[in-house]
Amino acid sequence: MKFEEFSIGDHYVTETVTVTKEEIIEFAEKYDPQYFHIDEEAAKESPYGSLIASGFHSLAVVWAEWVRKDILGSDCLGGVGAEIQWKAPVRPNDQLTGEFTVVDKKQASNGKRGLLTIDVVIKNQNEQKILTSNTDVFVAV
């Protein structure tokens, strides 16, 4: 969608994604090999008491669903930055859903793009927030 088609308050919900134990370990072995992400036995002695997903994994699986919705599509010109806060751990078989809300929009001075600020909230199957993010994205006008 073009920049001018967005309005502050636009709200989108992703499909739900189930995070499996195997995916947690596979992602972590490649990108975040901390013991509580890759070693089920050692994770029992961690502050979390069990295996948990990398926060980046939690974000990535829901972000993929956001991209599949094709809201921004080819009008997306790339991200500018994001602030991420991890609120709660994601455990094997948790089901994650993302909510994306446009909270601000600004036209760039060159008139060729606009900047959307999108709040992202990821919740698990119990409606518990596991991640929040404030993301800025350039979009074609």
Image (cartoon, rainbow, N blue to C red):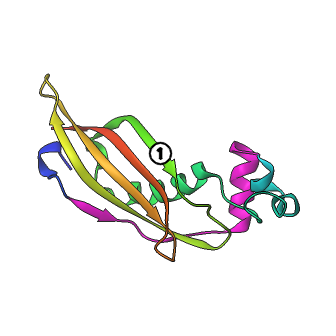
Q: Nearer the viewer, residue 99 or 60?
A: 99
Seen in the picture, residue 95 relative to 12 is either above or below; the reply is below
| 12 within the magenta span | yes
Res. 40 image quadrant:
bottom right
Horizontally, residue 67 falls left or right of residue 71, namely: right
> SS of the residue at dot 1?
strand
Residue linked to disc 1:
84
Left or right: 90 with respect to 137? right
Residue at (62% x, 63% y) in the render: 90
Q: Quadrant of the C terminus?
A: top left
Task: Decide if residue 28 is on the left or right side of residue 81.
Answer: right
Question: Would residue 69 appear left or right of 94 to someone viewing this image?
Answer: left
Residue 26 in the image, given as x and y percentages of width and height: 73, 55
Q: Position of residue 112 (x, y in %)?
A: 16, 29
**Which residue is drawn at the image coordinates 17% and 45% (left, top)?**
2
Magenta run includes residue 56 = no
Percent coordinates x, y for residue 72 in the rendering: 28, 49
The magenta span reads: 10-33
Q: In which image quadrant can residue 52 be found?
A: bottom right
In this view, 136 is above or below 132? above
Estimate how packed mark 1 is, as few (under 14), some (14 to 19) or many (20 or more) residues with alpha carbons within 10 Å: some
Whole-percent x and y of residue 63?
A: 46, 54
Name which residue lies at 70% across and 44% down: 32
Front residue of 132 and 114 = 132
Residue positioned most to the top: 110
Amino acid on which the number 1 mark rests in the picture: Ile
Residue lying furthest front: 47
Task: Residue 83: name its quadrant.
Answer: top left
